[in-house]
Amino acid sequence: MTLTKKKRLLFEKQAEIAKAIAHPLRIAIVDFLKDGEQCVCDIAESVGSERSNVSRHLSVMVSAGVLACRKEGLKVIYRLRTPCILDFFSCTAECLKQQLKDTEKLLSTL
Amino acid sequence: MTLTKKKRLLFEKQAEIAKAIAHPLRIAIVDFLKDGEQCVCDIAESVGSERSNVSRHLSVMVSAGVLACRKEGLKVIYRLRTPCILDFFSCTAECLKQQLKDTEKLLSTL
DNA sequence: TGACTATGTGATTATATACTCACATAATAG
DNA sequence: CTATTATGTGAGTATATAATCACATAGTCA
């Protein structure tokens, strides 16, 4: 137990944000929202899942502070709250590239 | 089902990477490793958890491609494999700031 | 008002994950 | 060889998460 309470709390918050995008469907949602806000029904159609399920995923991401939403008539429109979330995508790309590179290096020694 | 197989696979990989850091202890580990590689025993002491538990968390992160490791005598030394993972930390900071800002805005209307 | 549409939620079930303990493995030193 | 240390793993339990279905709510329009 060498972590301070402050750090511990920060790490929990950070983990909550990471958790909020740690699901293929939620990644798909974030990807879909990168070009602008969308309603639940369009999001559901885009990612190919039930509305009730999508609605739950959306609320998780709102709770974590990844998404924000507003009502517009019958619809609820969701949007990314911080564009930096998209940086995560380029990092994952780098991770996957690095994985590929390491695999190639391993294979070349055989 | 409007997602292509290719996108679906990519989103799964990305989610796996996100999952790999979506835990307070794993965030703590990544934070500890930002200044350089470390062995399991030192990591365990730093984050304040059992070695067996830490070992499991480490293997999850290696599988996802977030960490890499090497043996050195009795010890196994872990390190971040892609520095961009640390960018996630600044993004979460931005998310938390934004949350605070929104809360303040809400309170000011009362 | 009633019909319709979009969204959210309760309850259930299935699955995944985390933690602990005891034990196994591997490297090293004597 | 034995003892020691660092690490990893199997099994069990507890908890968290996801998906589905049925239903509730809220806004719109005739």
Image: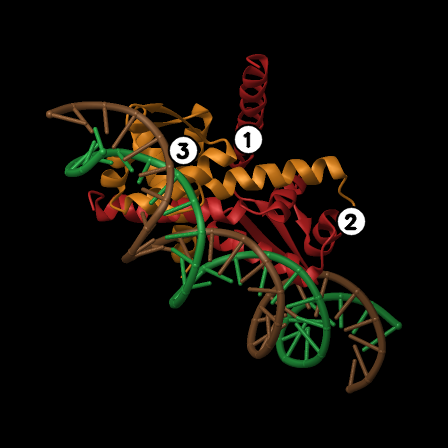
Chain colours: A red, B orange, C brown, D green
**Residue count near mark 2 (Cα–Cα under 10 Å), binned few <14, some 14–19, many ≥20:** few
Q: Do circles 3 and 1 both sit on a common chain?
A: no
Task: Give the x, y percent position of residue C10.
Answer: 56, 77
Q: Residues within 10 Å of mark 3 (few under 14, many from 20)?
A: few
Q: Is residue A7 visible?
A: yes
Residue that label 2 marks: B1
Instruction: Give x and y (percent) for residue B59.
Output: 43, 38
Q: Using residue B42 as the reference point, say whether residue A83 is left or right of it.
A: right
Q: Which chain carries label 3?
A: B
* Residue visible at 72% across and 55% down in the picture: A49
Image quadrant holding the C terminus of chain A, namely: top right
Residue drawn at x 68%, y 38% as measured from the top left: B9
User: Distance between the Cα atoms at labels 3 and 2?
Assistant: 34 Å
Q: Name the residue under label 3.
A: B90
Residue situated in front as seen by the camera: A107 or A27: A107
Asked if the residue at tag 2 contacts the one at tag 3, i.e. Cβ–Cβ closer than 8 Å, the answer is no
Residue at image location 53% in from the left, 20% down from the top: A102
Amino acid carrying mark 2 in the image: Met
Residue D22, image x, y percentages: 71, 79
Q: In this view, does B16 lie above or below D10?
A: above
Query: Residues at marks 1 and 2, common chain?
Result: no
What chain letter is assigned to the residue under label 2?
Answer: B
**Residue topped by disc 1:** A92
The first of marks 3 and 2 along the sequence is 2
Compared to residue A87, the image places residue C6 above or below, namely below
Taking B14 as reference, is A5 above or below it? below
Q: In the rendered structure, are the residues bearing label 3 and label 1 in contact, judged by CB atoms less than 8 Å apart? A: no
